[in-house]
Amino acid sequence: MKITDLKFRKDIPDGDKMATLRFAEALADNKQPVATNYSAFGARKVDETSTGPVIEAIAVSEGIKRDGSTIQVKGIDLRNLKANPVLMWAHRYDQPPIGRIVDFRKTTVDGLGKVLKIRFTPCKTSTDTEHKRFSDSIFEMLMNGDLRTVSFGWRTVEAEPIRDGDGYYTGWNFIRTDAMETSVVPVPADPDALIT
């Protein structure tokens, strides 16, 4: 794909065009740009451990999302995330994790199709710190329903633009991705990535 192959409708803001072109340029240079996709399919408690609840969520589902893009679940490489199964707050890589992912499953859900389901727990630390209290408050909000959504963060390995019937760019088809982390977030872009 050449960057010049992307054409945009006139109503697309210049900032969105520039971000898309930068992403396409990074892909063309094999730089594997980082991306995120928010999900809103509802979290639910499925078990209890000595450190707190085990919560299940859909981290990502296939299909066109609010940003016009889709992720191919079969193309998600989980090796790096399994080696470092961090649960973050809102993709804040400058902060410690708020929990850890204890299970990953690619599966099919009626009405959604292919999804990546995860189960996660609070961090094991018992030290009373500001961050521990913050993490505990996030898990409390997950348990009482004030927070329900997660977001999947990845490096792009292979992607192609999605075009409408007139050939205009509408989003990305992420064919192969390298999973980096999952975050609890307050606002989803993928309305199907909720705590289940």
Image (cartoon, helix red, strand yellow):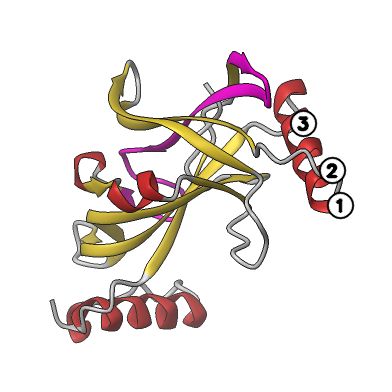
Q: Is residue 73 magenta?
A: no
The image position of residue 79, as x and y in percent, is 28, 48
CB under 8 Å between discs 2 and 1: yes
Q: Tell me how far mark 3 sits from mark 1, CA to CA.
A: 17 Å
Question: Circle 1 — which element?
Answer: helix
- Please tell me whether mark 2 or mark 3 is closer to you in this view: 2
> Taking 171 as reference, is 190 left or right?
right
- Please tell me whether mark 3 or mark 1 is closer to you in this view: 1
**Visible residue check, residue 91:** yes
Residue at which label 2 appears = 133
The image position of residue 68, as x and y in percent, is 38, 54
Q: Quadrant of residue 140?
A: top right
Residue drawn at (85%, 50%) of the image: 129
Question: Circle 2 — which element?
Answer: helix
Q: Is residue 69 magenta?
A: yes
Q: Tell me how far mark 2 sits from mark 1, CA to CA.
A: 5 Å
The image position of residue 164, as x and y in percent, is 24, 58
Which residue type does callout 1 highlight? Answer: Glu
Which range of residues does the magenta coloring cover? 47-70
Residue at which label 3 appears = 141
Q: Tell me how far mark 2 sits from mark 3, CA to CA.
A: 12 Å
> Taking 130 as reference, is 126 left or right?
left
- Of the two numbered discs 3 and 1 on the same chain, state the one appearing first in sequence: 1
Depicted 67 relative to depicted 145: above or below: below
Packing grade of label 2 (10 A; few <14, some 14-19, many >=20) is few
**Visible residue check, residue 192:** no
Name the mark on residue 130: 1
